[in-house]
Image: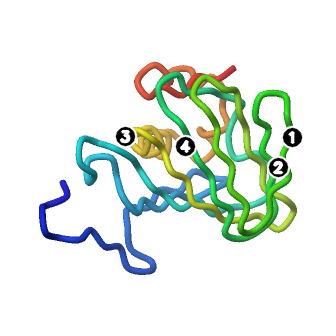
Amino acid sequence: MLLPGRAHTVAPGEGRIVNLGVTRMRVLAAGDETTGRAFTLAEFAGEHGPWTVPHLHRGMEESFFVLDGDFTFTVGEEEIPAGPGSYVLVPRGTRHLLAAGVAGGRCLVLMVPGGQEDMFFELGELGSDSLRDPRVRAAIAAKYDSIPV
């Protein structure tokens, strides 16, 4: 929990990290560290290919800021190429998927409201490719508002 008058800081290489197989998540600000679980901010870094299954969130908006590499975001039916410095906002209720280019990549992900990081930690305990396994995702989707479509 963020304490009044105190900054929340995460030094390089610090933060809670989970290996999700194709990508790795490092939490910079967890939902329970923000007032009222306002948001989660995480860095994702990984190899080429899709990092997830097509899915949507009914109660959350997700933003992506590309730090390194080239990505293709599929938002609804639109394919959006995005390189370093690009920003993509996925509105609530919109089907989306992201895939990293041949060199892999790294991006910041802002999830509003916070708490979605708990799903990634749970998926990390279920195996290295659980993030891209539709059956595994479907089994926990209801708890975390991440619905495979």
* Amino acid type shown at disc 1: Glu
Eye-nearest disc, 3 or 4: 3
Which sits earlier in the primary sequence, circle 3 or circle 2? 2
Q: What residue is rendered at 29% in x and 42% in y? A: 37
CB-based contact (under 8 Å), mark 3 and mark 2: no
* Amino acid type shown at disc 4: Gly
Classed neighbour count for the residue bearing mark 1: other residues with Cα under 10 Å, few (<14), some (14–19), many (≥20): few
Which residue is denoted by mark 1 in the rendering? 79
Q: Which mark is residue 127?
A: 4
Which sits earlier in the primary sequence, circle 1 or circle 2? 2
Relative to 84, does residue 98 appear above or below in the rendering?
above
Eye-nearest disc, 4 or 2: 2
CB-based contact (under 8 Å), mark 1 and mark 2: yes
Question: Secondary structure beneath disc 1?
Answer: strand
Alpha carbons under labels 1 and 3: distance apart: 27 Å
Which residue is denoted by mark 2 in the rendering? 72
Which sits earlier in the primary sequence, circle 3 or circle 4? 3
Q: What residue is rendered at 37% in x and 67% in y? A: 15
In the picture, residue 114 is in which quadrant? top left
Classed neighbour count for the residue bearing mark 4: other residues with Cα under 10 Å, few (<14), some (14–19), many (≥20): some
Taking 15 as reference, is 145 left or right? right
CB-based contact (under 8 Å), mark 4 and mark 1: no
Which residue is denoted by mark 3 in the rendering? 115
Q: Position of residue 66 (x, y in %)?
A: 68, 62
Alpha carbons under labels 4 and 1: distance apart: 29 Å
Q: What residue is rendered at 33% in x and 47% in y? A: 31
Q: Position of residue 101 (x, y in %)?
A: 84, 59
Alpha carbons under labels 4 and 2: distance apart: 25 Å
* Amino acid type shown at disc 2: Thr
Which sits earlier in the primary sequence, circle 4 or circle 1? 1
